[in-house]
């Protein structure tokens, strides 16, 4: 028997329980950290390329990496109502020994099952006790075994600042979950947690990360930055409230990502929580809005214009919803419109916009130029004009431009993907 009533299981039993318990954490993207081997020269094992995995995550630059995603233990002394691992939950508990996590990671890595480790944990004894154990695991991987794979460590709320900082010397990315967007909601559902404590930790990590960037001779400090996660739909916070919190986190603490995780009812859940899951489309719309805020020069007011009750429109993606509210601005002439307006055209991504801006320096763009940019012509055609194309006015005057956006369909092998009717 382990202490705290945790039963001794076989390694595979524990893996089953602790990998399953980790699936509720959405913040598993590996960030944009480069290979450690590129930084520290040769030696050690590991690489961020190739292999098959257990938990697939997509990096912001589109790479897919596979991570061993586990909890060190699903035992926890806290009682966060939305969490299946809370102290009052009736789930089977397990705890890895530190050397077991090291061994599993190395074995899976050598077999090419994974490219890194995502390690989180419930809180045993105290936040510091737990954090120290997690640091020993990743420190052993790095310093004893020369592990060069990716490590994302979910830090423990309320652990001491020194430990939070120390973790960054061994992890590629650190995250600390806000979980709920307001202190009022935390008071109700996770009374042991405080937004102020969480954001103080984020502030310290931000300072340390920026120090590492300016001090070239220092070893790399958590090169993938920090991220967080918010649960959507467990409390009554509106999309406006959620996105306002995200905007604050991005601007004050330079977070790389805020992850949104739609609440789904858990076994034996508290009566305080909704009995129905939050719609996944809401989570999706929040991700889209988040993306527009970070890369498309949208403001929160832009995103929320025309929304009802401070909630995003679930029927249209936020960019199309904005276009529908601002249809008097369209069609936009791709040869003259400012970049910040081009970014607002449904169907045009940042790369396409930059290509348009670069190309139009040399010649006026035609429909044929646009079709070579691999953009969705069906999506953009109501909103743009070029040298030899302008949509009919009545197309823009239709009540719902969204109807023009066709659902994707798979084309047969002989259809040309560039077929488009000019009008
Ligand atoms: S501290 Fe983490 S693991 Fe523990 S109950 Fe809260 S969310 Fe769950």
Image: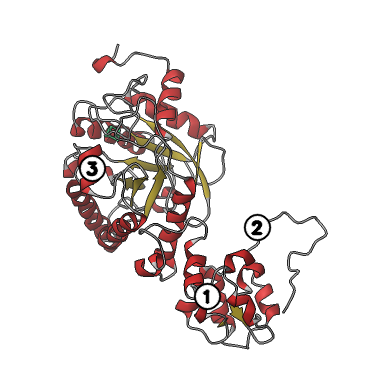
Q: At x 63% / y 76%, what residue is drawn?
A: 395
Q: Nearer the viewer, residue 234 or 231?
A: 234
Name the front one of labels 2 and 1.
2
Where does label 2 land, which residue?
Answer: 407
Q: Is residue 400 above or below residue 396?
A: above
Q: Which mark is drawn over residue 186?
A: 3
Distance from label 2 to label 1 (Cα)?
Answer: 26 Å
Q: Secondary structure at mark 3?
A: helix
Q: Is residue 289 above or below residue 126?
A: below
Circles 3, 1 touching at the beta carbon (< 8 Å): no
Q: Is residue 77 above or below residue 135?
A: above
Q: Is residue 2 above or below residue 207?
A: above
Distance from label 3 to label 2 (Cα)?
Answer: 40 Å
Where does label 1 land, which residue?
Answer: 354
Q: Secondary structure at mark 1?
A: helix
Q: Secondary structure at mark 2?
A: loop
> Does mark 3's beta carbon lie closer than 8 Å to ligand 1?
no
Q: At x 33% / y 26%, what residue is drawn?
A: 74
Question: Which residue, as the protein is rendered here, is positioned at the far front?
Answer: 399
Q: Quadrant of the C terminus?
A: bottom right
Distance from label 3 to label 1 (Cα)?
Answer: 42 Å
Q: Position of residue 422 (x, y in %)?
A: 73, 77
Q: Which mark is drawn over residue 420?
A: none
Q: Is residue 185 left or right of residue 307?
A: left
Q: Earlier in the sequence, mark 3 or mark 1?
A: 3
Q: Position of residue 124 (x, y in %)?
A: 24, 26
Q: At x 62% / y 64%, what residue is drawn?
A: 403
Circles 2, 1 touching at the beta carbon (< 8 Å): no
Circles 3, 2 touching at the beta carbon (< 8 Å): no
């Amino acid at each position: 028997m382990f202490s705290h009533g945790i039963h001794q299981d076989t390694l595979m039993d524990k893996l089953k329980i602790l990998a399953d318990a980790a699936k509720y954490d959405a913040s598993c993207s590996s960030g944009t950290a480069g290979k450690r081997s590129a930084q520290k020269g040769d030696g050690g094992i590991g690489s961020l390329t190739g292999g098959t995995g257990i938990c697939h995550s997509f990096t912001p630059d589109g790479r897919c990496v596979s991570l061993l995603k586990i909890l060190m233990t699903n035992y926890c002394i806290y009682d966060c109502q939305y969490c299946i691992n809370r102290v009052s939950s009736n789930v089977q508990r397990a705890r890895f020994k530190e050397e077991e996590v090291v061994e599993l990671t190395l074995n899976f890595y050598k077999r090419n099952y994974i490219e890194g480790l995502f390690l989180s944990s419930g809180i045993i004894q105290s936040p510091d006790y737990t954090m120290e154990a997690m640091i020993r695991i990743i420190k052993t991987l790095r310093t004893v075994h020369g592990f060069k794979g990716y490590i994302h460590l979910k830090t423990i709320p309320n652990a001491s600042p020194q430990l939070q900082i120390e973790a960054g010397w061994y992890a590629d990315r650190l995250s600390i979950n806000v979980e709920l967007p307001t202190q009022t909601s935390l008071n109700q559902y996770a009374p042991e947690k405080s937004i102020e404590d969480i954001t103080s930790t984020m502030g310290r990590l931000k300072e340390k990360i920026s120090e590492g960037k300016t001090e070239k001779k220092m070893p790399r400090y958590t090169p993938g930055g920090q991220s967080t996660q918010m649960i959507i739909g467990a409390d009554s916070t509106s999309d406006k409230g959620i996105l306002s919190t995200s905007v604050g986190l991005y601007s004050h603490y330079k977070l790389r990502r805020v992850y949104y995780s739609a609440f789904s009812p858990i076994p034996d859940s508290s009566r305080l929580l909704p009995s129905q899951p939050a719609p996944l489309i809401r989570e999706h719309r929040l991700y889209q809005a988040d993306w527009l805020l970070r890369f498309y020069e949208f403001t929160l007011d832009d995103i929320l214009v025309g929304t009802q009750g401070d909630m995003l429109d679930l029927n249209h993606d936020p960019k199309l919803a904005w276009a529908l509210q601002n249809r008097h601005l369209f069609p936009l002439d791709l040869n003259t419109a400012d970049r910040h307006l081009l970014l607002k055209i449904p169907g045009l991504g940042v790369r396409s916009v930059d290509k348009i801006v670069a190309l139009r320096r040399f010649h006026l763009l035609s429909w044929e130029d646009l079709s070579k940019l691999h953009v969705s012509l069906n999506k953009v055609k109501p909103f743009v004009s070029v040298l030899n194309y302008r949509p009919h006015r009545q197309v823009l005057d239709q009540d719902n431009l969204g109807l023009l956006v066709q659902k994707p369909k798979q084309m047969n092998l002989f259809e040309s993907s560039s077929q488009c009717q000019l009008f």
